[in-house]
Image (tube, rainbow, N blue to C red):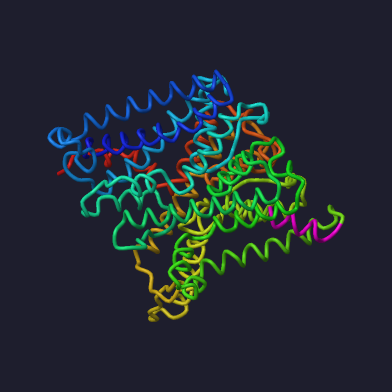
Amino acid sequence: MNIKAIGFYIGHILRIEGILLVPALLIAAYRQEVASFHGFGITILAVLAVGMLLLFLCSNRGNLREGKWSSHFGGEIRAKEGFVITSLGWIVLSLFGALPFYISGAIPKYIDCWFETVSGFTTTGATILSEIETLPMSILYWRSFTHWIGGMGVLVFLLAIVPMSKGTGETFHLLRAESPGPSVGKLTPRLRHTARILYLIYVALTVIMVVFLLVGGMPLFDSITTAFGTAGTGGFAIKNASIAAYDSAYLQIVIGVFMLIFGINFNVFYLVLVGRAAQAFKSEELRLYLGIIGVSTLAISLNVLPMFSNFWDALHHSFFQVSSIITTTGFATVDFNLWPEFSRMLLVLLTVIGACAGSTGGGIKVARVVILWKALKSDMQKMLRPRTVKAVCVDGKILDDHVIKGVFSYMTAFVFVVLVSILLVSFENFDMETTVTAVITCISNVGPGLGMVGPTGNFSAFSVLSKLVLTADMLIGRLEIFPMLLLFSASTWKSRT
């Protein structure tokens, strides 16, 4: 295990986090929020100090004398270092990111601060807070900004702005460990250019959304924080009533549409930008994703129609909640916990399915659903005709066996983690609806579930043990399970042979 490489990358991650904390510090200074200013100021100093120390200890001394701090740790990184850097980086990022909440006194208990921060960075949106609107503006900003940082991934951001390697392919291990989906590819020959393109699309869509919200009359601060939560498909709102606080069909539709957009694979946007829209819209994953949204919206609309004054209202709120849940954003315009059982169960199913691979959404991803269905059909045909050779194809391309095997391994691990987590959380003696959906919504990075953790509830009643389990589930879900499991595997830490 290349410990220096791990320390080097963690140092860079902390240095970037220190810079990203500065806007919140400036807001605290402008608003004269003394406690928050101290919280952000102390955190920035601590993060930068630890980050710079790690860079100093893990960088090549000769290159340091020349002022070079990138790609100059000892040796190279392999797949296991990539997984460790990714999982450990997210843990450290969250541990330090929780300090402003704790030092400022906005959230008294550190375990709650860490839960809230992990929920932010993993774009889950599960909260322990019952009163949000009384929080200082700087704290609200940082809380929502964690969604935007975590949406595309901190390591993607790191690769986009810092030259970390000399074309050896080392950073591909980092992108593979952090990127959601059954397989990872590059949009351009150079990985750094791919990361930059992804972030440029991400930033552009966020800015466009802010403009649309401002046109609808939403205040600037609300527009920015709401765009952060939507772009990262996170769901932290700055109002106690979430998006229901904005009694505007226009604003709710804009947010619903942009949630849907950010749940699409970003490769689609790239293909559209380079004039290959026809190829983009032939994606089987995209067609299934849009089809699921359309069918689910119509089905729920008809099911909840008696609860609304007209079909338009039923359709409007059904679309918003379907878009919110399948993209794992978690915003709400109504208390869907009160909807009929069919609609509630359909939303739970959408929670598990999630958004497209290569998006900012969570869940198991629509791409895996496509692969699982096609692999199942292929196996059934082989049972009927054992001598038949039937390849599994997606978008006209034959999938490698290791991709299909990886999807089945992922699903096995997903079910295992969910069952163990449900068993541990069941010690709370809450109702089954609360226990099961709390775990599912955390590992799928959605936020609200049913029962006590519904859209009008929160996670404050859970014990420390359950909060630790659910926090682990959020990290496991965001990093696609294996990086977190490998972090605690003894074989990962064995020395090179």
Q: Give x and y (percent) for residue 269.
A: 48, 63
- What range is drawn magenta here? 310-320
Say which quarter of the image contains residue 375: bottom left
Magenta region, mostly helix, strand or loop?
helix
Relative side of 159 to 227, left or right: left
Q: Quadrant of residue 320?
A: bottom right
Left or right? Give the position of 23 relative to 309. Answer: left
Q: Locate residue 34, reporting x and y percent.
A: 55, 18
> Number of marks in the image?
0
Q: Is residue 47 above or below residue 477?
A: above
Check the image and name the residue furthest to the left: 62
Q: Quadrant of the C terminus?
A: top left
Question: 245 left or right of 493?
Answer: right
The quadrant of the rendering that contains the N terminus is top left
Tell me the quarter of the picture where residue 331 sits: top right
At horizontal 35% and vertical 44% (from top left) the residue drawn is 158
In the image, residue 169 lies at what x, y percent?
24, 54
Q: Is residue 316 magenta?
A: yes
Residue located 45% across and 49% down the image: 152
Q: Kindly identify the residue that appears in the image at 53 percent across and 47 percent down.
A: 232
Magenta stretch: includes residue 64: no
Q: Position of residue 427 (x, y in %)?
A: 58, 31
Q: Is residue 359 left or right of residue 77?
A: right
54 relative to 212, above or below: above
- In the image, residue 121 sits, relative to residue 45, either above or below, namely below
